[in-house]
Image (cartoon, rainbow, N blue to C red):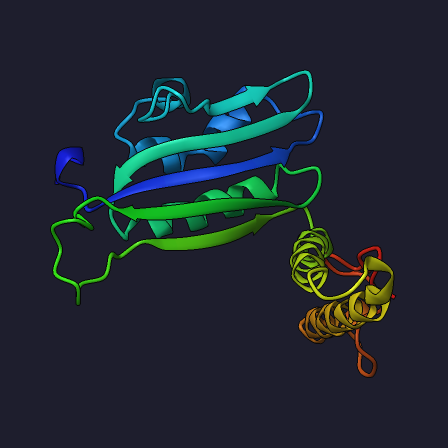
Amino acid sequence: MSNYDAPFEIHVHGDVPLRADVSYEQLQDALAPLWKYAGAKSLADAAESAYEEEPGIRFDAQEHLLTLCWTVAGDEDFRQSLDEMCMSLNELAEQGAAIEVTFYDAEFDEEEAPPEDDSRDDFLMLFVGPTPAAIMQVQRDLLVEDVVHLMERHFDASELNGVVAEVDKLFAQRFDALVSSLELGKPPRGGGNGGSGGSGGHGGRRPRHLH
């Protein structure tokens, strides 16, 4: 299938803070699922977006920041490329970050389509980070922002502390459940009988705000 026949225009958008030691070569490897999907031979070859007004894929070596504002023609199978990219970026990220992905139905014409037809537009919010705690922190912050924005139409911001506290409780419960599941999957220390492994594990530090 050529890009001209692709049923979607897919826009990837987000900023990912990277570790200070991350090189361009490492980033190129991590983003290989994207540029290979676009049919390019390298990251540089695919860095430009399908739209000139979009920055595309940019790596700021001084700020240690990956900026994504990039559109590619594709199909549903692009989701697999996104999964692979996120797994690789987890290893390079300095802190948690959100990546927005929008699938625009390139074949849908609102003016010509019958009233009963709907476009296949879709939206995904993906998260990357060095630990589960870092990822949950971003999820928590975005949810609090959305909830506060919605409820400020009816309440003063000072009245919403209890709502934010309840959101924190939910994420604290999820985080504790994650840590417990990781602990259950670890072999006993020393390989002997009795007792599960001690504290630790990936993401063993509770995100801030989650008290």
Q: Residue at x 16, y 49 (%)?
A: 111
Q: Is residue 81 above or below residue 191?
A: above
Q: Is residue 4 above or below residue 159?
A: above
Name the residue rendered at 57%, 50% in the picture: 127
Q: Looking at the picture, how far across and down is residue 150, in whole percent?
A: 65, 61
Left or right for 68, reference 160: left
- Left or right: 46, with 135 as reference point: left
Q: Quadrant of the C terminus?
A: bottom right
Residue 142 spot, x, y in % from top left = 66, 54
**Which residue is at 54% across, 37% downward?**
14
Q: Quadrant of residue 31?
A: top left
Image-based side of 178 in relation to 78, left or right: right
Task: Identify the residue shown where x is 60% and y is 19%.
Answer: 60
Report which quarter residue 207 is drawn in. bottom right
Q: Looking at the picture, tell me which residue is in the foreground, 128 or 202.
A: 128
Q: Position of residue 147 (x, y in %)?
A: 68, 62
In which quadrant of the rendered image does the N terminus lie? Answer: top left
Residue lying farthest to the bottom in this orientation: 194
Marks counted in the figure total 0
Q: Quadrant of residue 45?
A: top left
**Residue 51: percent from the left, percent from the top?**
33, 25
